[in-house]
Image (cartoon, helix red, strand yellow):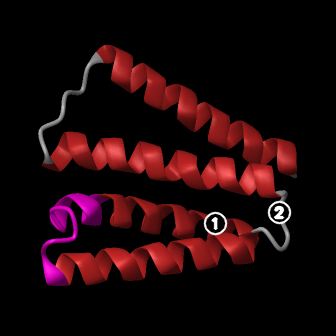
Amino acid sequence: MPWILLVIAGLLEVAWAIGLKQSEGFTRLWPSLFTAAAIAASVWLLGQATRSLPVGTAYAVWTGIGAVGSVIVGILFYHEPATLWRLLCLMLIIAGIVGLKFASG
């Protein structure tokens, strides 16, 4: 269960990262409210996951999911570059997330 909470927290991190862009520096009301709610939910779920998981592992996985997801959304929806180096770096982050999962049992 803590891993499920952590994955959901990571996906919410992607949502709030994209929300930051959509809120245009918190100048748009509804995207700003969505972003604030996603931040709160994401951090709360991360906190719940750390009750059972090592904090270092949980935080690294949470930020990794957020980073990978944000880059993928940026590539797919914001026409950000999908260069070989960016994709290789994403693969390294994913490998790190998977490695931490297996190392944590």
* Amino acid beneath label 2: Leu
**For residue 92: magenta?**
no
Q: In this view, does 64 lie above or below 24?
A: above
The residue at 19%/28% (across/down) is: 81
Tag 2 residue: 53
Tag 1 residue: 6
* Residue 32 drawn at (x, y percent): 24, 77
Q: In this view, does 20 lie above or below 8?
A: above
* Residue 78 drawn at (x, y percent): 13, 46
| Stretch in magenta | 18-29
- Secondary structure at badge 1 equals helix
The residue at 32%/16% (across/down) is: 84
Tags 1 and 2 in contact by the CB under 8 Å rule? Answer: yes
Instruction: Give the position of the N terminus as an image quadrant.
Output: bottom right
The residue at 70%/73% (across/down) is: 47
Image position of 45 (left or right of 16): right
- The label shown at residue 45 is none
**For residue 22: magenta?**
yes
Q: Is residue 47 above or below residue 24?
A: below
